[in-house]
Amino acid sequence: MKTFQSRLADPAAVSPSDTRHVQRLDVAGMRCEFPALRDSFVHLDGTAGTQVPRSVAAAIAETMSAAMSHGGTLTAAGRTAHAAVRAARSAIGDLVGAQPEGVIFGRNMTEMTFGMARTIAKTWRPGDEVVVCRLDHAANIAPWVLEADRAGATVRWIDFDTETGDITLDDVTAALSDRTRLVAMTAASNVLGTRPAIEQMAAAIHAAGALLYLDGVALTPHAPVDVTTCGADFFALSTHKVFGPHCAAVVARPALLEELSPDRLPCTPDSVPGRFELGTPSYEVLAGVRAMVDYLASLAGDTHQSRRARVLHAMGLIEEHEKVLRTRLVEGITSLRGVRVHGRPRLCTPTTLLSVVGTPPRALAEFLAERGIGVSVGTFHAEEATRALGLGPEGAIRVGPVAYNTTADIDAVVDAVGRFARAQ
Ligand SMILES: Cc1ncc(COP(=O)(O)O)c(C=O)c1O
């Protein structure tokens, strides 16, 4: 009988020299840059957070070893700190196609979204409507529901197809009215990988006169992003999911930020985006964010183009590589008796949710961890989605490949899940 591995072509195998016709992501070269990937452990929990390349860790260490003071212009140390902030804004601008003046930094997406919701909701009134999406991470639901309650606004929900995991344009328009002030939805699900057709949906949302707050946390590591083309008014991302340090950014048009008035100290600068950032920034982390985007750009190979062009190229290579990983993973898992893959979205990231029928997911996660394979288990702060999928509080297993994963990693997890399922 043919083994699972031999039945599948292996275009994403580690072969850096294979550049015959189409440029492919140099996964082997990439892996050498990640100190955490030196041992044989298989990291397939990238949706929760990625490992970092040496250059990111070095940028943080160098910034902390250099003379550093509060950002300012008086001393070299102050100028270094200021420069780290400016460089990070410009880097995130290049990552998602935004103006640096529209890039706000914060500790993580959850905290930032609570802050943005508090600010944006200041003009909401009873009778206004706010739309959230059942497929989203709680970080893009709870802050909006809380603020809607405070303002006396009505919350409406976008549902998704629990068989496929897809959200249609009709699902979105059904939730809109002329009272809709804001739609909060995901650019990619952190449980099913679903990538809704955001451009189309943004047009409908804007036609209804509402703003779109897009959770880009689970999309940014997997595909080229252009915040202008996709129509997001606000785009949130976490750099710890994109080979960077623990940090987050919310990106918006500077003119839109000018209209908003966040709570702040009397002495906080009035200019944007600074008025949204409270207290002292984490300069060393921002140096790591800049290094993260430089690293992504370096994956494109070509050093003659702008960083933005190289980032787009590199993210396209990552997207292609991950499509191969996802196909191999889903084909492998669905060939196993008693194992179920949840959802089959038309367009998705490689994030894949699975269950072994009749077995607690934690038992499988432990079995995999004992065999050197890291996956995630639980409901992943997406309880609205996992409940709609019929999963209990124990949730399911999430396999979250990212760019540095190989087909060998996928084969390892498929084989181990198969062994576990057969033993039940
Ligand atoms: C889709 C999505 N949105 C939001 C978040 C929250 O991000 P953070 O950890 O930066 O608060 C996560 C984290 O897993 C996520 O996957």
Image: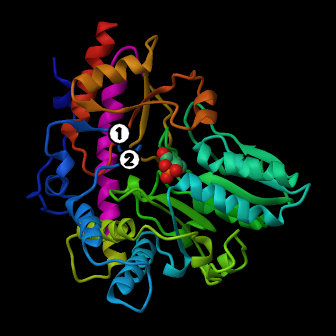
| Viewer-closest of 114 and 7 | 114
The circle drawn on residue 45 is: 1
- Left or right of 120: which side holds 335? left
Tag 1 near tag 2, CB within 8 Å: yes
Q: Residue at x 74, y 47 (%)?
A: 145
| Viewer-closest of 14 and 345 | 14
As measured in the structure, the alpha-carbon distance from the residue carrying label 1 to the one carrying label 2 is 7 Å
Q: Quadrant of the N terminus?
A: top left
Q: Amino acid under label 1? A: Asp
Crowd band around label 2 with a 10 angstrom C-alpha radius: few (<14), some (14–19), many (20+): some
Residue 325 among those drawn in magenta:
yes
Q: Which residues are magenta?
A: 312-340
Q: Secondary structure at mark 2?
A: loop
Provide the residue designation for mark 2.
49
- Quick check: 268 above or below 374? below
Residue 75 among those drawn in magenta:
no
Q: Residue at x 23, y 36 (%)?
A: 42
- Left or right of 405: which side holds 72? right
Question: Whole-percent x and y of residue 129?
Answer: 83, 54
